[in-house]
Image (cartoon, rainbow, N blue to C red):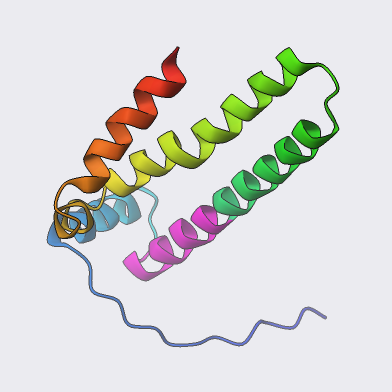
Amino acid sequence: MKTEAKKVRQSVSLAATVASRIRTMAESRRLSATRMLVELIENGIEVEERKQKEFFDLAKRFRNEADPEAAKRLGDRMGQMVFVDGCRKSHDRRTFSKALGGILSIECVIARSAFRA
């Protein structure tokens, strides 16, 4: 017999555009907006856990790599995961970027140019 996990009520505020997109997605899949939110959150958690595992696997390969050229490529990929991918995520939060006075944007441009070579 399957036991159901304890449920916790959680309140969140969403931007109107995000709420609208969630409602549209929910309608197309014939789900409630609440169920759609739960699925999106669960999927997001899985993606973040997978990315974290990928990063630690890459770090382990980097530490164990004997070939300097291969180690450089692995190090570059780790840097790209930390800086460039992180910049993409932070640019989705315009208010966060504005709060830093554009510093984040400048650092992202530098990181992107450094890892494109």
Q: Nearer the viewer, residue 72 or 14?
A: 72
Q: Quadrant of the N terminus?
A: bottom right
Q: Main secondary structure of the magenta part?
A: helix
Q: Does the stretch in magenta take in 41? A: yes
Q: Is residue 50 magenta?
A: no
Q: Is residue 74 toward the left or the right of residue 20 in the image?
A: right
Vertical relation: 37 (above or below) 115: below
Q: From the viewer's perspective, is residue 87 above or below residue 113?
A: below
Query: What's drawn in magenta, residue-wise?
Result: 32-45
Percent across and percent down for residue 114 are 41, 22
Q: Position of residue 113 (x, y in %)?
A: 35, 21
Is residue 65 placed above or below 101 in the rendered structure?
above
Nearer to the camera, 11 or 26? 11
Residue 115, quarter of the rendered image: top left
Quadrant containing the C terminus is top left
Which residue corresponds to the image point at 17% horizontal and 62% vertical from the top-left?
15
Q: Position of residue 11 (x, y in %)?
A: 32, 82
Q: Residue at x 37, y 70 (%)?
A: 34
Identified at 75% across, 32% down, the residue is: 62
- Say whether residue 20 is left or right of residue 61: left
15 or 80, nearer to the observer: 80
Would you place residue 19 above or below residue 10 in this image?
Answer: above
